[in-house]
Amino acid sequence: MTTSEVRPEATAEIGLHLLDDHRHNKETAFTAEEREAFGLLGLLPPAIETLERQVERVLLQLAAKPNDLECYIYLNELAERDETLFFRTVMSDPARFIPILYDPTVADACLTFGHIYRRHAGLYVTRHMKGRIAEVLRHWPERDVRFICVSTGHRILGLGDIGANGMGIPIGKLQLYTACAGVPPDGLLPILLDVGTTNDALRADPLYLGLREKPPSPEQLDELTDELMEAVQDVFPGCCVHFEDWKGTDAVHMLDRYLDRYLCYNDDIQGTAAVALAGILAALKETGGRLRDQRFLFFGAGSAGLGIADLLVRALQRDGLAEDDALGRVSMFDINGLVERSRTDLDPAQRRYAHDAAPSTDLVETIEAFAPTALIGVSTKGGAFTQEVVEAMSRLNPRPIIFALSNPTDRAEVSAEHAYRWSNGQALYAAGVQFPDVTLDGKTFRPGQANNFYVFPAIGLATYVTRPKRLTYECFIVAAEGVADQVGPELRARGMLYPSQADILESEVTTATRVAESIFDQGLAQVERPEDIRAWIEGQLYQPTH
Ligand code: NAI
């Protein structure tokens, strides 16, 4: 806003509004001229500060906080008070602040959401608003909403169904669009679709803030979600809907239902798959192998495993295999043993991966029979990759790819330390959590973290600039390649399979450029193709400056 846009008689009112408007508030950084023009004289202490000085104060106040949850509360209050200062702080050291705004601290914040609640943020759409969802969306003050992140709160991180307490997730995910990839924050809308919760303890908590009801039938949920999707088209045309942390079966179902109809994606399915594929592609740079020649054994055949396997099969086909051959390169092992043809307990998604093989409940035996080059843990079974398992993989492969993606830490199928030790430092290892560095025989390994934040903010940025009609699986494969191509020999020599978190903005822009190119190539973009895509993207990045 410039002073010339303001009528003099309105200045007193504007001053207070400005201080209450987190998007325009600069607090002590308002200049003398602005203080005069907007009726701010006397409302602020006399010092006029730079953003750098303000960040210094934020860091000082954060240092006094006793734990990360208190830092989370403080930072989110700051976001509601002074958005620019919030993002300037977070973007000054993303590797430090992302784990506070998102996983793992957000899990504590969600668990205690009703207790630490300060003020409204995002939108709550409940099943009782059926027939009125468009009206509710119009209550949001921004008109040009470009992304909605929507969760039912039914499968939050490792916490299960926590209902309306899950609001911290869409808020945090969207903050990462900006903090990691420079997507402007004004077009981001977090929504908690509150359809009740199965969590009895929460429903009994007097401070719980959501509906105290059990979830509706699948048909009722479909009707409500259909209305939400249609209302989004109506109120915010061109908006991308990011589904996050829905119950596994609902997540798969909604993606199937809407993927070809609306601009949408599911980060738990497609983002997870892309980040796992990125790790595999980075590992192959080290082994020198080609994707189509690999054999993948999944330990765990749930929503994460199936999502990764399905994207892998598409990537294998893209690398020249027929669908049947691609499927034959992927095998699964779940709580009842090897997924094979004689099993009668498999659902259709798992049945795709049931091959002609002898039944087995012994993982080492299965490894010896299937001879995988990569073993991917997505089972929630901590410690399942024993020394015998890692040694079996090492006997078959000079550089075995071993991913332990289950989280939190105590659920990882094998720790970084054990994976490196038991493979004599040869494992190409990544985990779902960030394990500390491991030193073995004088060499220090920095274990990779298969964190979705390498992919979804870049998908967001590419979507933001190209305004595509749809997001395809191809976009996610390209994103995975974009991430993997950034892991050079120096990083790989330290055991890293993902780019450095400290350079996250640079990394996301690089990935987003690749995805944007692909969106143009696929004919999905609804803007004109610029000559220099990267420069064009860089020109649209949010800058946390006054
Ligand atoms: P899920 O509950 O849908 O599936 C778990 C699968 O593991 C099932 O097939 C089950 O039969 C199998 N399983 C459980 N216990 C087992 C055992 N003792 N032996 C063999 N198989 C066993 O869970 P979902 O959603 O697939 O998630 C799995 C894990 O992956 C979770 O810990 C989750 O946190 C993690 N994950 C990690 C991500 C990442 O690193 N970016 C992203 C998404 C999930």
Image (cartoon, rainbow, N blue to C red):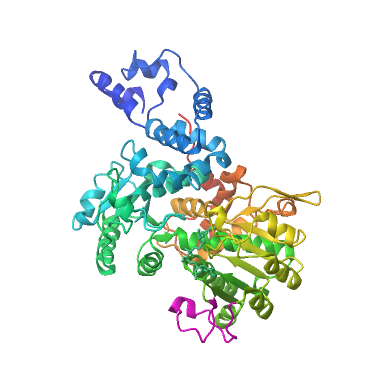
Magenta highlight on residue 492: no
Q: Is residue 343 magenta?
A: yes
Q: Residue at x 48, y 19 (%)?
A: 49
* Residue plotted at (67% across, 81% down): 369
Q: Is residue 447 left or right of residue 251?
A: right
- Residue 171 placement: quadrant: top left
Relative depth, front residue between 516 and 278: 278
**Residue that lies at the very extreme toward the right in this rendered image:** 441
Can you say whether 92 is above or below 200 in the image? Answer: above
Q: Position of residue 466 (x, y in %)?
A: 45, 54
Q: Quadrant of the N terminus?
A: top left
User: Can I make out residue 521 in this image?
Assistant: no
* Relative to 469, residue 47 above or below: above
Please state the extent of the stretch shown in magenta in the rendering.
337-361
In the image, residue 108 sits, relative to residue 242, either above or below, namely: above
Number of numbered discs on residues: 0
Tell me the chief SS of the magenta region: loop
Closest to the observer, 136 or 463: 136
Name, please, the residue furthest toward the left: 131
Q: In which quadrant of the rendered image does the C terminus lie?
A: top left
Q: Is residue 283 visible in the rendered structure shown here?
A: yes
The image position of residue 491, as x and y in percent, is: 71, 51
Question: What residue appears at the point 56 percent right and 55 percent down from the top-left corner?
Answer: 410
Horizontal and vertical percent position of residue 117: 34, 39
Using the rendered view, name the quadrant where residue 17 is placed. Answer: top left
- Give the x, y percent position of residue 84: 44, 32
Compared across the picture, whether 451 is left or right of 248 comes to right
